[in-house]
Image (cartoon, rainbow, N blue to C red):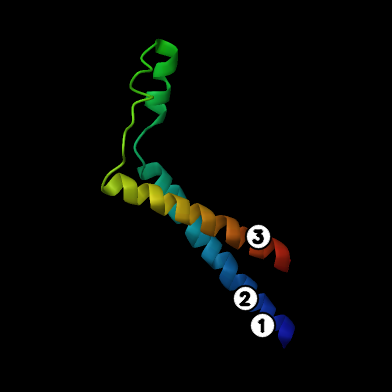
Amino acid sequence: MVNYVLEMEVIYVETALLIVSILLIAIVLLQSSKASDAGQIISGGNDILFENQKERGVELFITRLTILLGAAFFILSFIIFITK
């Protein structure tokens, strides 16, 4: 009986990991492109890259959600590793 309960818990954690993974992929794709700013280092336009730019509104929310989902992904992956 205990083994069955443990298997069910692992299934719930794996399902949660799948949902977090899909959400993490979607939220990363929604982020604004900072790679285009980084590409300006090569072309010499690096003054824009090192400016102090604050994220506001939706960008700040997406950044914080990405950090939260990344941490959740790491924790759930670690739980699955420990239980198997």
**Mark 2 touches mark 3? (CB < 8 Å):** no
Separation of residues labelled 2 and 3 (CA atoms)? 14 Å
Q: Residue at x 59, y 62 (%)?
A: 76
Q: Nearer the viewer, residue 12 or 40?
A: 40
> How far across and down, in percent of the image, does residue 59 sit?
31, 44
Q: Which quarter shows the C terminus?
A: bottom right
Indicate which disc residue 5 carries.
Answer: 1
Q: Residue at x 72, y 85 (%)?
A: 2
Considering every residue shown, the one lying at the far bottom of the view is 1
Q: In terms of depth relative to the viewer, which is nearer, 50 or 1?
A: 50
Where the N terminus falls, by quadrant?
bottom right
Q: Of helix, strand and loop, which one carries label 3?
A: helix
- Quick one: 16 or 56, which is closer to the camera? 56
SS at circle 1: helix
Q: Position of residue 9 (x, y in %)?
A: 62, 76
Q: CA distance from mark 3 to mark 1?
A: 19 Å
Q: Where does residue 46 sit, x and y in percent of width and height?
A: 38, 17
Question: Relative to 79, is 7 above or below?
Answer: below
- Measured along the vertical axis of the image, is residue 83 above or below residue 55? below
What is the distance, in whole Å, between disc 2 and disc 1 at their CAs? 6 Å
Q: Residue furthest left?
A: 57
- The label number, if any, that marks residue 30 in the structure image: none
Q: Secondary structure at mark 2?
A: helix
Do tag 2 and tag 1 residues touch (Cβ < 8 Å)? yes
Query: Which tag is nearer the camera, tag 3 or tag 1?
Result: 3
Q: Which residue is mark 3?
A: 78
Q: Which residue is mark 2?
A: 9
